[in-house]
Image: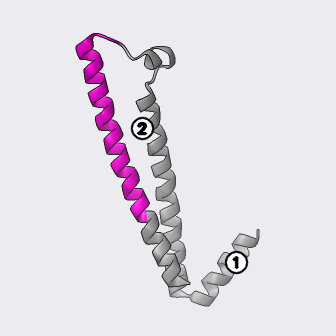
Amino acid sequence: MIDLDQARLAQAAVVRRQADELLCVLNADRAAFEQRLTESGRRDPIKSVTGRSSLDAAILQTREMMKHMDDLLATMNHDLRAIEADPAGALAALETAAAR
């Protein structure tokens, strides 16, 4: 059980790092796109209408997803440590919480 949980935690950490890489790419793409718009003298039509570009929205959604992932990773880490410290008691507490 603990090995599986540790594997899941490691897998979730990999996905979190991938999200961070995605955010870097989105930020770079936004900067490049804004530079191209400036050079061509054009404006972003979506940003003109909504106040934010589609890349701005993607960046915001990615940041929100990353925050949620950070919260879940912290919970997983906490739960795993509790199980390692007191396997019987922690599992009983988790089962009770899951039944609610």
Is 20 in the magenta?
Answer: yes
Residue that protrudes farthest toward the right in the picture: 100
Residue 67: which numbered mark, if any? none
Residue 60 coordinates in the image, percent (x, y): 45, 37
Q: Main structural element of the magenta stretch: helix, strand or loop?
A: helix
Query: Could you tell me which secondary element the residue under label 2 belongs to?
Result: helix
Q: In which quarter of the image is the C terminus?
A: bottom right
Q: Which residue is depicted at the point 36% across and 13% down?
A: 43
Is 93 in the magenta?
Answer: no
Residue of label 2: 59
Residue 95: which numbered mark, if any? 1
For label 1, count other residues whose C-alpha is less than 10 Å away and answer few (under 14), some (14-19) or many (20+): few
Q: How far apart are marks 2 and 1 (CA)?
A: 37 Å
Q: Give the range drawn in magenta.
A: 13-42
Q: What residue type is labelled 2?
A: Ile
Placement of 50 over or under 23, stated as above or below: above
Residue 58 coordinates in the image, percent (x, y): 45, 36
Q: In which quarter of the image is the N terminus?
A: bottom right
Placement of 56 over or under 90, stated as above or below: above
Q: Which residue is depicted at the point 49% across and 48% down?
A: 65
* Sequence-wise first label, 2 or 1: 2
Query: Could you tell me which secondary element the residue under label 1 belongs to?
Result: helix
Q: Nearer the viewer, residue 25 or 81?
A: 25
